Image: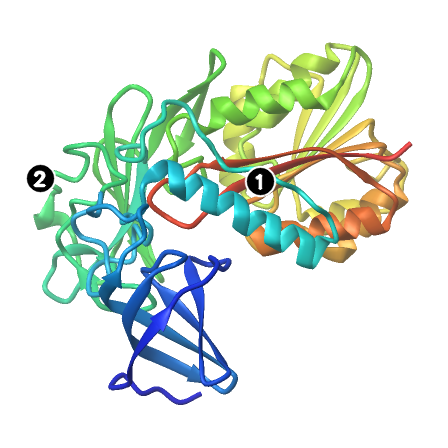
Amino acid sequence: MSTDTCTELTLETGAAANGGSCIARHDGRVVFVRYSLPGEKVRVRVTDQRGSYWHADVVEVLQPSADRIDPLCPIAGVDGAGCCDQAFVEPAALRTIKGQVVANQLERLGGFQWDGRAEAVGTDTAIGWRTRVRLEVGADGRPGFHRYHSAELVTDLRCGQLPDGMLDELPADRLRTGDQVHVVLDDDGVRHVVCGGQHRRTRVVEGEYHGIQRVAGREWSLPVTAFWQAHRDAASTYGELVAGWAGLADGMTAWDLYGGAGVFAATLGAAVGDSGRVISVDTSRDATRAGRAALADMPQVRLVTESVRRALSAPAGQDSALGDSADVALLDPPRAGAGREVIDRIAAAGVPRVIHIGCEAAAFARDIGLYRGHGYTVEQLRVFDAFPLTHHVECFALLTKG
């Protein structure tokens, strides 16, 4: 790889690509242009040269798209923080673009045609939706956000994703250079600030180590450092969707794979009743521990701390956490997706109904293609704008096999 940050070009942008850039061309090369919209004429600075394709940032918009607006995040942009890479796009237009990107990935990588747009999560607002964030403390002792693909920090903390005041008056005297600072605004409105980092003991500098989260009338006490949906309305929105798609009845069995603290397990457990069975699997001890406490009144739900791959690989029988098969499997894998081995084992177990979730469009599309290769049919597919002001999405698919 070579880099020439002095190269500037004038380009016309085409369609949006996965990852937040638009595609342009220069002398036969593909150029991925960040901070642009389809159909714009822009002056760009080349940041990476990789043979047949380059990467560039917009330095001047010569002919703007009608969907370009004044940025909704004051600290993001080419020379700012990497938090809100799409803050300059009108929110409704951005949801259309996100749908187009997912559709392109599904066709290219999953062999599946879909025509739709991303849906808003909860109230239709692009700002102030995030309830948990992680910062890093720089050499000057100040916390900040990283610039895009950089170790440099932006210490202006007015990110558009955050509610007003969420990062006001952080206890600076208790922060140390190199700290990873987790800040959570829980469902009781209490702010918790927890610091740690590599080879460092975790320290509570404000609030408690555990915060309270609620979904559908149920309460979780969860470590601030554990995973929980960042969007304040995401967990409830997704839970309602899963309840509608699962198609479960009393006495049935469901697998909740990559189940975290058991939010979906609670929904599935209510559907299968006391005579049914839900097995939730996740590698995080903190998450499964919190889930067991939250679901202690649901004996039909079992939370297992284990790798999904190992759980699926265990021989069926007494030593198997999952058993032979399930009526429904729900998978919410990390960004890299579930992958071939896991999906092969879901299919081999004969699971007839699958709800698959993905937070990265290409990985989600590849997984959909793997299911289709096993004879599954995509019955429903929805995409959520769960991360407004960014290029990220959350994708849901209902797949069945007769």
Q: Earlier in the sequence, mark 1 or mark 2?
A: 2
Q: Quadrant of the C terminus?
A: top right
Q: For numbered disc 1, what is the local secondary structure?
A: strand
Which residue shows up at 31% across the image and 41% down it?
90
| Residue 395 badge | 1
| Front disc: 1 or 2 | 1
- Please name the amino acid that badge 1 sits on: Cys
Q: For numbered disc 2, what is the local secondary structure?
A: loop
Residue nearer the viewer, 46 or 338: 46
| Residue 322 badge | none
Q: In the figure, is residue 74 to the left or right of 9? A: left
Residue nearer the viewer, 5 or 30: 30
Q: Which residue is mark 2?
A: 169
- Residue 364's spot in the image, x, y percent? 63, 49
Q: Quadrant of the N terminus?
A: bottom left
- Please name the amino acid that badge 2 sits on: Glu
Q: Quadrant of residue 85?
A: bottom left
Q: Residues within 10 Å of mark 2 (few under 14, many from 20)?
A: few
Residue 244 sits above or below residue 224 on the image:
above
